[in-house]
Image (spheres, rainbow, N blue to C red):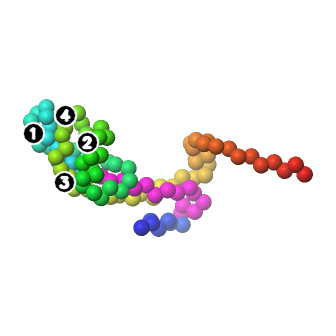
């Protein structure tokens, strides 16, 4: 569902950014205890098995932590805006197309 854009950002470049914040129950192999770690993943991830796979393979867990299960997850969508001037200042040129009028 799209976030309603307030009038104050009219004329700005906007993007909705979605991320999944998950609390993963882990086994700490160094201290031999169970503890939780919070990870943030870009995009919407509602499947616990997929979250566990990402936690194992992404390197987002501290060294020595072995993921055991998902305690909780939250999907957060933020609406972000930037002025066109700042966009032109900070953005990266990917490609350029030029048209000329030879008349």
Q: How far apart are marks 2 and 4 (CA)?
A: 11 Å
Residue located beneath label 4 in the image: 64
* Residue 25 numbered tag: none
Q: Nearer the viewer, mark 1 or mark 2?
A: 2
Q: Between disc 1 and disc 3, whose residue precedes?
A: 1
**Local crowd size for mark 3, using a 10 Å CA cut-off: few (<14), some (14–19), many (≥20):** some
Magenta span: chief secondary structure: strand
Task: Look at the picture and state if 63 lies above or below 45.
Answer: above
Q: Nearer the viewer, residue 49 or 60?
A: 49
Residue 19 lies within the magenta run = yes
Residue at 24%, 55% in the rendered image: 48
Where disc 3 sits, the SS reads strand
Residue 33 lies within the magenta run = no
- The magenta region covers 8-22
The total of numbered circles placed on residues is 4
Horizontal side of 31 relative to 56 (left or right) equals left
Q: Distance between the residues labelled 3 and 4?
A: 19 Å
Residue at 52%, 57% in the rendered image: 14
Q: Between disc 2 and disc 4, whose residue precedes?
A: 2
Position in image of residue 21 (x %, y %): 30, 52
Residue located beneath label 3 in the image: 71
Q: Quadrant of residue 28?
A: top left
Task: Look at the picture and state if 55 lies above or below 81.
Answer: above
Residue located beneath label 2 in the image: 56
Q: Between disc 1 and disc 4, whose residue precedes?
A: 1
């Amino acid at each position: 569902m799209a976030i309603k854009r307030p009038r104050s950002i009219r004329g700005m470049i906007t993007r909705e950014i979605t991320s999944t914040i998950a609390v993963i129950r882990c086994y700490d192999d160094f201290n031999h205890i169970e503890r939780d770690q919070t990870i943030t993943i870009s995009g919407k991830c509602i499947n616990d098995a997929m979250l566990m796979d990402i936690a194992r393979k992404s390197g987002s867990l501290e060294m020595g932590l072995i993921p055991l299960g998902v305690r909780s997850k939250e999907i957060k969508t933020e609406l972000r805006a930037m002025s066109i001037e700042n966009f032109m200042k900070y953005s990266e040129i990917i490609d350029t197309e030029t048209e000329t009028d030879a008349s």
